[in-house]
Image (cartoon, grey):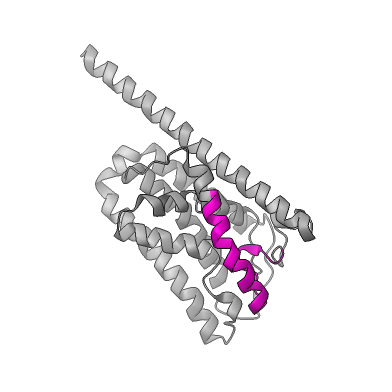
């Protein structure tokens, strides 16, 4: 389970992969559908998600250190690690700006990363379990903050946070060149086959990366607007029922 050399046979859309994705989407649906029934268990959900994120991030580095596999490109500077830190911060302190950024980089990106994961280990290897637990807990945390903490995103948040990510990416780009790393996948796509593998190379890779990021931000915001419309309709229906009674 913790071996460095064994279980390095991850297969895209294998049974463990598909089952993991199904469990994740079922959990998301349950959080949305049973929102009211789960309200009394809000503190429990909060600390479970907090604990999963914290343990996943720490255990990843601990395993790499103990197996002498830790390298400079394992620094927590990928989007999933930044999303993890933002979520951990939000569980401890309310902050609208932090949530705005988490919403855009912590909703669809980790889900896409689970659909085409950049891993080589198969279930039940530790790295498989850690990868999917952490990437599941990030968007589940976003759902938690929306449904149980009442966070919402302003329309201007799309462009503002897109620019914020680009500003963050500038020093990351030069850091990659200095250290030979690939944080934010700005140097090249991941070594394994992912969506980024179809983005081309050279300048076209960066153009496609920017276009994809902007589209992702827009789609993510549309999901928020759709959610708000459903909630408003639900509130109006409850008001009408209350008035009729």
Rendering coords of residue 28 (x, y %): 46, 45
Query: Residue 27: horizontal and vertical position, in percent?
Result: 45, 47
> Horizontal placement of 141 versus 127: left or right?
left
Q: Residue furthest top?
A: 244
Q: Position of residue 71 (x, y in %)?
A: 59, 81
Mainly helix, strand or loop, the magenta region? helix
Q: Does 90 sit above or below residue 2? A: above
- Report whether 149 appears left or right of 203: left
Picture residue at 42% right of the left edge, 28% below the top: 230
| Observer able to see residue 121 | no
Can you tell which quarter of the image residue 52 is in? bottom left
Q: Is residue 91 above or below residue 126?
A: above
Residue drawn at x 53%, y 44% as measured from the top left: 159
Front residue (pair 245, 58): 58
Q: Residue furthest left?
A: 245
Residue at image point 50% right, 74% down: 60
Q: Residue at x 65, y 80 (%)?
A: 5
Residue 25's place in the image compared with 241, above or below, is below
**Residue 202 found in image quarter:** bottom right
Q: Position of residue 29 (x, y in %)?
A: 45, 41
Q: Quadrant of the C terminus?
A: top left
Q: Nearer the viewer, residue 85 or 50?
A: 85
Quadrant housing the N terminus: bottom right
Query: What's the magenta region?
Result: 162-188
Q: Is residue 33 left or right of residue 110?
A: left
Q: Is residue 169 magenta?
A: yes
């Amino acid at each position: 389970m913790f071996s460095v050399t064994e279980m390095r046979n991850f297969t895209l859309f294998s049974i463990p992969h598909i089952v993991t994705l199904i469990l994740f989407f079922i959990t998301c649906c349950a959080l949305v559908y049973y929102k009211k029934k789960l309200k009394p268990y809000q503190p429990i959900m909060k600390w479970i998600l907090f604990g999963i994120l914290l343990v996943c991030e720490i255990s990843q580095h601990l395993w790499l250190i103990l197996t002498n596999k830790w390298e400079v490109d394992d620094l927590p500077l990928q989007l999933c690690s930044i999303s993890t830190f933002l979520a951990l911060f939000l569980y401890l302190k309310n902050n609208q700006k932090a949530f705005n950024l988490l919403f855009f980089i912590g909703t669809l990106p980790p889900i896409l990363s689970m659909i085409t994961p950049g891993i080589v280990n198969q279930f039940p290897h530790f790295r498989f379990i850690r990868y999917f637990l952490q990437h599941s807990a990030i968007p589940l945390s976003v759902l938690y903050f929306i449904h149980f903490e009442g966070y919402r995103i302003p329309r201007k948040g799309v462009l503002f946070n897109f620019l914020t990510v680009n500003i963050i990416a500038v020093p990351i780009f030069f850091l990659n060149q200095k250290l030979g790393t690939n944080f934010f996948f700005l140097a090249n796509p991941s070594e394994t086959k992912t969506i980024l593998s179809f983005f081309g190379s050279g300048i076209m890779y960066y153009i496609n990366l920017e276009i994809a990021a902007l589209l992702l931000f827009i789609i993510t915001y549309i999901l928020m607007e759709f959610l708000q419309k459903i909630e408003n309709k639900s509130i109006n229906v409850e008001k009408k029922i209350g008035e009729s009674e």
